Image (cartoon, rainbow, N blue to C red):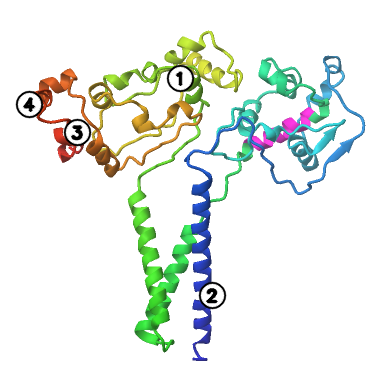
Amino acid sequence: MRKYFPVVKIKYLLSLIFFSLLMATVLSDSLQATNTNKIQPKDTTRIQVKDTTKVHGKDSLNLPVKDSISHVSSDSTIYKRTIFSSEDLRRGERLFFGLVYLGDKSVNCADCHNTRVSDTLNWNPDALEISRKYLEKSSLDLRKVLLKPAGPKMKQVHKGFQLGAEDIVLIKAYMNKFAGIGLKQNKPVITNLLLLIVASILFLLSSIDVVIRKIYKDQRINWAILTVTGIFITWILAINAIAFGRAKGYAPAQPIKFSHAVHAGQNKTDCNYCHYTARTSKTAGIPAGSICLNCHFLVRNGTRSGATEIAKVLKALDDKKPVKWVRIYKLPDFVFFSHEQHVSAGKITCDACHGNVKEMNRLYQVPDLSMGWCIDCHKTRKVNLSNEYYKTYYSDLYDSLKAGKIDSVRVTGIGGRDCGKCHY
């Protein structure tokens, strides 16, 4: 027994780690399920992003330094500055994150402009977007938008900014650097992967002990480890294999921050006005820029995003380039699905498949689009046989329903479970 003590100790420690991680994961999932019933996190117009800078204290300047139109000529040499030291870039970073007091207050640009990748909708453009926009522009151009913004929203947010010429130049220098660095990625969660690795090692050690070494006289310990880890490994592999290729909760960042909550919810725009091909085609289609222009020919400022996002639509139209929207819902190539069949013939509303879009700022995939999900819908959904399509092609069922021989017909009764209906 002493000879194999290190192996026993390792297995004991691995068992403790495995069960600790497993319990932590279960508790974390249960708490998350209790705290939220939605897949998509709550949208926010101001994401408080605190970035990592080594020095957390704030610099203080006793005298406020203000910039004004009268100072432009005297500060012209400062605005033309193009060479910066590492200390200059560091101070520009501190100015950007509000770690320097200018007079009696500081300005934290990261409060409104994300410096990290986020899965929630921030109506303000992120720091990377602004940095790239002003990469080829001068510090004077940045000064104008910081101290003399044109839009009403920016005027309200930027009111009272106390930034001198040197401050703006240093912020611009840091933004140029940030354009090359990009948004910081969030660290991936590897709990399940770590659990799988530990469980696999434990399963292997216990299997060897049972078959070959037989360190433990009481093999019930090994069989217990084999049972628990075997069930866990099978479960996690099965769950991930089933979920392979599915994207429930998928909510990619779009090139334009379009809000369905604003358009479909607040403004009560009919879904079929923008997605007009849903009634006559397989796909609902992505609206062309000309559809947007029907309203935004006059509406040039949004209540949340100002002119920033609407300007992107107008620029795409002026450049005669399509907006590169990221597709969310997508079925495999071997699956046939027609919006026309469901919307026009079946009279199914959009929220049946896409969820309550009227409350979504950032659109996300609600169902998993599995075959089981479709079949469950076909089992329970009743068919409205008064539709001319069904009267023509399913006249026997319509006559039986009219005569009172049957009380209803579900989709499965008209071939909703036939393989050839969806797979060809």
- Magenta residues span 168-179
**Label 2, label 4: how many angstroms apart (C-alpha)?**
70 Å
Q: Circle 2 is placed at which residue position?
A: 13
At label 3, the amino acid type is Arg
Instruction: Determine crowd level at label 4: few under 14, some 14-19, many 20+ residues with C-alpha closer than 10 A.
Output: few
Label placed on residue 410: 3
Residue 218 in view, yes or no: yes
Badge 2 amino acid? Leu
Above or below 153: residue 338:
below
Foreground label between 2 and 1 = 2
Q: Mark 1 points at which residue?
A: 321
Identify which residue, 359 or 46, lies in the foreground. Answer: 359
Mark 3 or 1, closer to the camera: 3
Residue 335 in view, yes or no: no
* Label of residue 210 in the image: none
Rendering quarter of residue 185: top right
